[in-house]
Each structure stands twice: as structure tokens, then as C-alpha cells.
Image (spheres, helix red, strand yellow):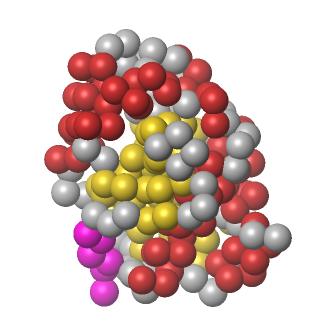
Amino acid sequence: MTAIMPAPVTLESETVRLEPLTAAHVPDLFLSGGGDDEVWRWLPVATPRTETELATIAAGLIDDRDVVPFAVILKETDRAVGWTTYIDTPGFDESIEIGWTWYGRAVWRSGVNTACKILLLDHAFGKLGLNRVQLKTDVLNLRSQEAIRRLGGVQEGVLRRHRRRTDGSWRDTVYFSILDDEWPAHRTRLCL
């Protein structure tokens, strides 16, 4: 059985809240990472230079039936500091992808990414009953690869010349996965 995309839901930990992405999040999101080339470097769109450009990108995710986007709310400030998504993975039974993730620099190396991924992985394997979660990144994005490995992601392979980057160069894409029976041990390690 192929997994069905989950309904939008709010997920919450002590530090972050993931809530369905809406246009109302755009002003906070733009303050957090709009116009920052390093934040947007690895994403498949040009760096948004205005709130309007960011709103257009967000609307594309919100309107895409194969994506469930979440605004990442830092509970300490109650402001959106990035977004992340569940993405459909055609051809994989009982599987989903976590991707299209970005955070403003102010929360890099702060534990926000780990908190978000724990929420998404717990929901995928627990409530949704999925078998596999896929994560992927640009072969040159070493920071993201390290973060995925730290979560417990196992590298499955590299798709060479998978797609074009926004600068026109070819991107090789590194694929990782975490399986449902692997997640409990990784979760315990991450929560120590």
C-alpha cells in the first residue's frame, strides 16, 4: 500500500511547534531568513528578496497536494523561524519524505532541527504507521548530510545529475532513510 499524504496537523515539543504553513507566517519567515543567500543556498528556488517572493514560494508548497508544509515556530518567541515539509514519495510503499527544510541562521546549531525532526519522525512512524522516512540533500551540502546522519539516517546512494541547481549547475543528490524499526534506538539516543 502506498502511503497517503497526512492531513495537516500541529505537532509540539518543549521548544518548537510545527503548525500548518499559511500566508500569515510569511512576515516572520521573511525576517528569519528572507534575502539570506546562505539560508536558501541548497533549496530548489532562488533566494526570496521580498516578502512577496517568499509568499509565492510558500503558496506553491501550500497548494501542492503532494506536500504537507509546516511553519516552524520557536516557542520562546512564538515566531516562525523556518519551515519543513512531508513530501510524497511515489513508488515507495508506506513511505514519506521529510524535506524542503530551512531555518533562519539565528537558530542554526540550536537544537531546533533535531526537535523538528523528532516530531516529524515520531508522527510518521507512530500516528501514520509508516515504514520508511526518506531524506535527501545536495551532495555538496555537508552540513545537512551530517545532520541527517546524526538523526540516524542511513545513506542509500547518490543520484548523479539528479536536477539543476538554481545557478544552472547539476546537482547530485544524496539519499538517506530511516526505517520504523530503527527509529526507537535513534530517538532514545537523541533524547539523552
- Residue at the (62%, 50%) spot, across then down: 113
| Image quadrant occupied by the N terminus | bottom left
**Vertical placement of 115 versus 1: above or below?**
above
**Vertical placement of 33 versus 172: above or below?**
above
Image spot of residue 126 (x, y percent)? 49, 84
**Vertical placement of 137 versus 94: above or below?**
above
The quadrant in which residue 2 appears is bottom left
Q: Nearer the viewer, residue 161 or 48?
A: 48
Residue 4 appears in the figure: yes
Range covered by the magenta-colored residues = 1-7
- Position of 46 compared to 113: left or right? left
- Position of 42 compared to 110: left or right? left
Q: Main secondary structure of the magenta part?
A: loop
Counting labels gives: 0
- Residue at the (32%, 37%) spot, across then down: 25
Image spot of residue 33 (x, y percent)? 49, 25
Image spot of residue 32 (x, y percent)? 49, 27
Magenta span includes 2: yes
- Position of 186 compared to 4: left or right? right
Residue 85 appears in the figure: no
Magenta span includes 89: no
Image spot of residue 159 (x, y percent)? 53, 49
Q: Nearer the viewer, residue 87 or 62?
A: 62
- Residue at the (56%, 64%) spot, across then down: 13
| Image quadrant occupied by the C terminus | bottom right
